[in-house]
Amino acid sequence: MEISATVREAQPYEVFDQYLSRAIAEAELRDAPSLAGFLGVETALVERGLRFLTTIGHLRRDVGTLTLTELGHRSVQEGFRYVEKEDRQRLYLDGFTSTPLPRTHYSGSVWLDEPQLSLPDGTTFHQVTSLAPFRASAVEELLCRSDREEFNLPSGLTAAKPLEVRQAWLPAYVVECVSSLLVFVKAVDGVDTYLSRVAGPFLRDVVAAETRVDTERVWREWLDGAGFPDVRPQRLANGVLRASLPAGVFGETFAWHRLGSFEVRRWIFLQLWCEDRNARQRAVLERARSIVRAGGARSADELAGRLTELAGQLEVPAPSADHVRRYTEREGDDPWAANLEQ
């Protein structure tokens, strides 16, 4: 949605304009001759200044009496010449409740003018459209929020009103868990808690209408084709389906980063695992090595946070920074100090 709004811009005062404004506000002079005498200048110069202050909304002239507007008073108080201009702003609101989306969903998001239901890698999306009408009051409600800057509406904007309302499409991945639906989008690292909360109740009906697949058959065919006919996937208490593979396949058949990750087939997930604790520990080190080499962590503290997260996912103790350093050097990488700030 595109809106028009009034933006208040702070500019440096021209010296004479500031003296005029202060004389009206503080000396309570209410006509041009009085101002001219007070400032010791020609009345014509004062008149020119008053016309300018009236034009920019700082001054009212009622039957010859001069009065500063709210904008003029604020400018005098704060020492800036505030000027109000019309501006245009783009806002995104979800199509289910007309609730504004956080600022995180602007930069980094992929918004489409038309629903594109397939990607070059074969990913297929379902078009989800809400029948709920747009709530015209949504913009006014956002204006009244104290946290509106978090929803891409700067505090300096006033008198916002919709100019154009049109649909835009946001590609999202929806994961069905035991007790909830989780939404993932490109702009947010990890679960999009906002869309999961807002859109989850509406998406549940969509997910429920999908044709259910035979989970056991899907993964039995995949494991047999990958050369693991004896591996039987197990369902964990949290609902995750996990297949434990021999340690020797990681680093050979499967890259190390796939240990602990998920395979997706027919919209269902299987976690690749290994019961060998040493293999999982090495997977953490390999992924840490890749993070450092790619510049994914710029300080030792940042790397430590990533290591804690990775180790937790793979259910092993987090390695120390020195352990990672020794490992990367042993594997023939450049000394990590070149890529990591100490």
Image: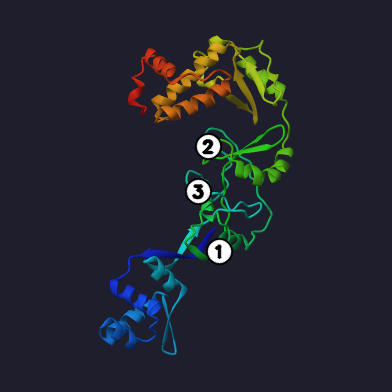
| Side (left or right) of 236 relative to 68 | right
Q: Nearer the viewer, residue 299 or 293?
A: 299
Q: Which residue is label 1 attached to?
A: 162
The one nearer the camera, 1 or 195, is 195
* Disc 3 target residue: 106
Q: Is residue 198 visible?
A: yes
Q: Is residue 257 above or below residue 12?
A: above
Alpha carbon separation for disc pair 2 and 3: 14 Å
Q: Position of residue 160 (x, y in %)?
A: 53, 65
Q: Give the percent coordinates (x, y) of residue 81.
A: 37, 68
- Viewer-proximal residue among 238 and 25: 25
Q: Would you call the spot at circle 3 few (<14 residues within 10 Å), some (14-19), or many (20 or more)?
A: some
Mark 2 crowdedness (10 Å alpha carbons): few <14, some 14-19, many ≥20 = few
Q: Quadrant of residue 303?
A: top left
> Left of 50 or right of it: where is 121?
right
Q: Secondary structure at mark 2?
A: loop
SS class, disc 1? strand
Residue 125: which numbered mark, if any?
none
User: Residue 77 at what x, y percent from top left?
Assistant: 41, 68
Q: Amino acid at mark 1?
A: Pro
Q: Residue at x 50, y 13 (%)?
A: 252
- Position of residue 248 relative to residue 313, above or below, is above
Secondary structure at numbered mark 3: loop
Location of the C terminus by quadrant is top left
Q: Position of residue 224 (x, y in %)?
A: 64, 15
Residue bearing mark 2: 189
Side of 96 where 77 appears, left or right: left
Height in image: 117 above or below 305? below
Q: CA distance from mark 1 to mark 3?
A: 18 Å
